[in-house]
Image (cartoon, rainbow, N blue to C red):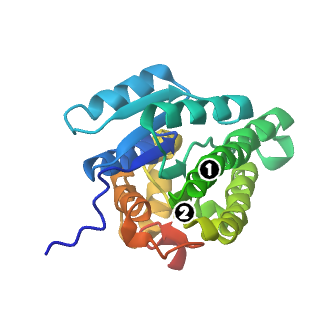
Amino acid sequence: MAYKPFDLTGKVALVTGGNGGIGFGMVEALAQAGADVVIWGSNPQKNADAAAKLDGVGVRVLTQTVNVGDENAVAAAMAEAVAKMGRIDTVIANAGVGGGGAKPFHEFSTEAYRKTLAVNMDGVFFTFREACKHMVARAAEGDTGGSLVVVSSMSAYSGAARNQAYAATKGAVLPLMKALAVEYARYNIRANSVLPGWVATDMTQGAQGNDKFNDRVIGRVPMRRWGEPADFGGIAVYLASDASSFHTADEFLIDGGYMVY
């Protein structure tokens, strides 16, 4: 008999920032594993392009234009997603913005700092609060279960110049997820974190063509390459599936071995 727990048929997964980069890498894998998917993104055209790439996969796809830093927008979008899809089994909070790069810390503006927190930290809080409302309501009707996943970063543990705001938000979501894992385990809801290393996305585009960076940083990655969005499909499917039914409060560092070298 074939091993079936990774089959996501009948499940619905919602991914914030799911229209590109790591988010779409997860969305694509979830859909190919049989899950219906909900894509949240702030760019309507990118949302439409992402949905078009899933044509022919054979699952339902819903796209919504959502600013995750706006709690009212998040609440309305989650309610609409549940109404249209019938249920949400997995929520992956992946939407994020970079918070560093151009200026040193002592010149970093309050406006930029607040924007980083609004998306990377407030957005996670608002998204999971609404997800938990739905999952707890389902549990009250005898339909327990769910999976919450946050995409953090190895920046939560490493020190990078001019990256303080981004790192602070990515560190803050780790204890949040552990607390959710403890509080909602009674409803059979799991909560885990994924920490990517250096991944080739729009956010890292400037560094990808920098020979010095590739030599000194990517050259230190034991697997000797940039990560790709598709590298995160497997962990998304695992955490959305019944194969991870007893796996919660964990942190998955996916960095090609960078942090241990």
Considering depth in this image, is 209 or 52 the residue closer to the camera? 52
| Relative to 170, residue 255 above or below | below
Query: x and y percent of residue 185 in the render?
Result: 61, 70
| Residue at point 55%, 67% (across, down) | 188
**Three-letter amino acid code of the residue under disc 2:** Leu
Nearer to the camera, 115 or 56: 56
**In the figure, 8 relative to 71: above or below?**
below
* C-alpha gap between disc 1 and disc 2: 30 Å
Residue at the far top: name it.
45
Label 2 sits on a secondary structure element that is strand
Q: How many marks?
A: 2
Q: Is residue 209 visible?
A: no
**Residue 217 on image: x %, y %:** 50, 62
Q: Dots 1 and 2: beta carbons under 8 Å?
A: no
For the residue carrying disc 2, how many other residues have a C-alpha within 10 Å: few (<14), some (14-19), or many (20+)? Answer: some
| Residue carrying label 1 | 137
| Quadrant in the picture for the N terminus | bottom left
- Residue located at (38% from left, 63% from top): 241
Q: Nearer the viewer, residue 190 or 84?
A: 84
Instruction: Name the residue at the front extreme.
Output: 141
Q: Amino acid at mark 1?
A: Ala
Residue pictured at 24% horizontal, 31% vertical: 55
Q: In this view of the protein, which residue sits in the foreground, 108 or 33?
A: 33
Q: Is residue 219 left or right of residue 32?
A: right
**Residue 96 x/y as whole percent:** 60, 43
- Mark nearer the N terminus (1 vs 2): 1
- Can residue 145 be seen here? The reply is yes
Q: Please give the residue where the numbered disc 2 appears in the rendered image.
A: 195
Q: Residue extending furthest left? A: 1
Indicate whether 95 appears above or below 247. above
Q: Is residue 168 above or below residue 3?
A: above
Task: Give x and y (percent) for residue 85.
Answer: 43, 36
